[in-house]
Image (cartoon, helix red, strand yellow):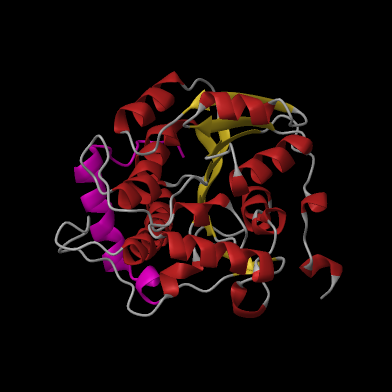
Amino acid sequence: MTRAQRWTAADLPDLSGTTFVVTGASSGLGAVTARELARAGGHVVLAVRSVIRGQRLAATLPGSTEVRRLDLADLSSIRAFASDWEGPLDVLVNNAGVMATPHAVTVDGFETQFATNHLGPFALTNLLLPSITDRVVTVASNAHRASGVDINFEDIQSESSYNPWRAYQQSKLANLLFTRELQRRLTKSGSSVTAHAVHPGYAATNLQGQTAHRTQRLLLALTNRLFAQSDTMGALPSLYAATQPLPGGSYTGPGGRGELRGHPAPARMSPYALDEYRARKLWAISEKLTSVNFADIPP
């Protein structure tokens, strides 16, 4: 690889005067993303469920940071966060997520993975969109390309049957469909704001500790130690997409074999993720469930 192909956080530009919101920034990829954006001079808002944990981390970070409470599994929390926002927001990084958790429903009655990974970022993005000046970055997963993964529109919240991994994979496909439909709407409205998706490859994070079965958690912990790249490497696609010139609708992941490891490079989407009909249908359902619509934004 040439130097241009081996982009790292050391290549971040001077981000002075730029404001970022990073959801789920108290640990894992979100913490690394927040740290590096702040190190490069950006003002970083850590949007987290636990303010105490967020403040502990913020105290260790370089540069300008602040902590605000946000629970993506609670629409009232999302609305409160958005209504309290004042001034321009350059970049929103939809990083927070859960993976293969036991079946549960949120306070709003939504299946937890679908709510946290898709409906929450969907609502937050649209509510903040009038303030966003540059771009939206949403963290998806190459798990969306697993065999047979599609949006089950007949049982989108897994009410008839629940498989924790299938629910996770569906939510990550939803991230990509959301990004592409958001970009289509932004382009149609004449906005200069762009939408991007990323995935971290196989990175060692705290997500693996949330899985439903103890045996799976132990196995994932072992494979993390043997095969996973670091959370620092896993955050590179997010940092790249948040700061580098990219076309709207881009998808970035690790450039190594199988997109599991490596430096940022264009990533592959499944045919379902590229389907405009699915994207529009999912958007309509998401608007109905959250009562949040695409914002009227200035071009």
Residue at point 71%, 39% (across, down): 35
- In the rendered image, the vertical position of residue 170 relative to residue 289, given as above or below: below
Q: Position of residue 246 (x, y in %)?
A: 62, 58
Left or right of 82 on screen, residue 31: right
Left or right of 8 on screen, residue 220: left
Quarter of the image where the N terminus is located: bottom right
- In the rendered image, the vertical position of residue 289 relative to residue 202, given as above or below: above
Tell me which segment is drawn in magenta: 271-299
- In the rendered image, the vertical position of residue 218 relative to residue 297, given as above or below: below
Residue 202 seen in the figure: no
Residue at point 57%, 60% (across, down): 247
Nearer to us in this view, 143 or 285: 143
Using the rendered view, name the quadrant where residue 149 is placed.
bottom left
Using the rendered view, name the quadrant where residue 75 is placed.
top left
Q: Position of residue 216 (x, y in %)?
A: 46, 65
Is-magenta flag for residue 68? no
